[in-house]
Amino acid sequence: MMLSVVVPCFNEEAGIQRLVEVLRATLSTIAADFEVILVDDGSRDETLARLRAVAQEDDRFRYLSFSRNFGKEAAILAGMSEATGDAVAVLDADLQHPPELLAKMLPFLSQGYDQVVAARTRTGDAAARTFASRLYYRAVNHLVDVELEDGVGDFRVLSRKATDALLALREYNRFSKGLFSWIGFATATVHYENVTREVGESKWGFRSLVNYGIDGILSFNSKPLRTAIHVGLVVVVLGVLYAAWVVIDAIVSGVTVSGYVTTICAVVLFGGVQMIMLGVIGEYLGRIYLETKGRPHYILKEVSPPVVRSAPVARETEPRTAQQPSTSTQNARSGGAKASA
């Protein structure tokens, strides 16, 4: 079985060499044939230079380089589009996704599973982040149309069938956790202890995590829009009840000039609710706007030189010039061009 490993990289110059050493040692023992596709997501350090050196040293390691930072979702898509293996694994470059766990994950594919996901514990995470994460997943699963599991991320192995199904989803606004769940197929889960990053710093700040969480909510349902209707109805009912109370109070007690504080509080409250609802509508409109543009998910600035293997490999990619700018990726299975949009 040919195994493809996709690794998104962003400013990972300090850890590339260690990553390659671990992957080379691990994959040589668990796969008869393998390839590693390292995707440089517009890094601003020497990541690309390190990837060039790795590809020159070992032709089992290939790289793609974006013209700018397009994000991890685009990097995963690009790597999977280039993968030629019968099974495709996705893991992070910081080794927080331990490659040795693949030895436990791959056997499940031969047992009829098309997805094998790795679920981590929260060991080592800050208490506040653990609490917020659990609260988010509990809330989001009541909103979205797919099931998202706490501790399950992008670290997984997919069969060729599942990979092709995922690549058929060409939407611009991608939320991989949801897409992996949406395509379905028989899924097995392998649990592992949380691993701390060996070198470098996390690229995920608080703002990035919040935006990622919002993407997860909006990408797979329209319930926030329905919620806006429900909130509007509740506000109307409360307004009618309050108006009735004011009329009755005026009849019983006479007209007074009191109620200034109540009026101001009501205006501020309902104004805030309206702004939130407009924001929700705006998010959906913005996503529709981006989808209608039809822009590619990424633009390739550089790819590693084509590999000429001594033995033919199924789904071999068509040779390309290493320095050729491209807005498309090669169709690894048929040898034809495949748009990245």
Image: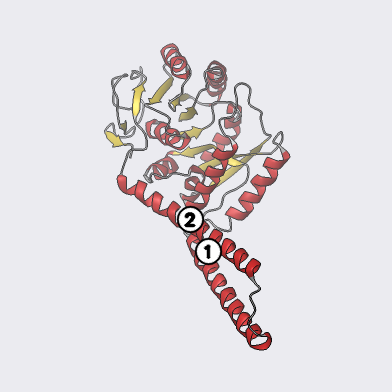
Seen in the picture, residue 136 relative to 44 is either above or below; the reply is: below
> On the image, numbered disc 1 is attached to which residue?
227
For badge 2, the amino acid type reads Val
Q: Secondary structure at mark 2?
A: helix
Looking at the rendered structure, the secondary structure element under dot 1 is helix
The C terminus is located in which quarter? top left
Q: Are marks 2 and 1 in contact (CB under 8 Å)?
A: yes
Question: What's the mark number on residue 8?
Answer: none
In the rendered image, is residue 186 in sight?
A: no
Question: Percent position (x, y) of residue 103?
Answer: 58, 30
Q: Nearer the viewer, mark 2 or mark 1?
A: 2
Give the labeled residue for mark 2. 280
Residue name at image x 57 percent, y 17 percent:
18
**Quarter-wise, where is residue 204 in the image?**
top right
The residue drawn where x is 54% and y is 26% is 93
Q: Is residue 107 left or right of residue 71?
A: right
Amino acid of disc 1: Thr
Q: Is residue 52 above or below residue 108?
A: above
Is residue 141 something that shows in the picture? yes
Disc 1: CA contacts within 10 A as few (<14), some (14-19) or many (>=20): some
Mark 2: few/some/many CA within 10 Å (<14, 14-19, 20+): some
Left or right: 152, with 173 as reference point: right
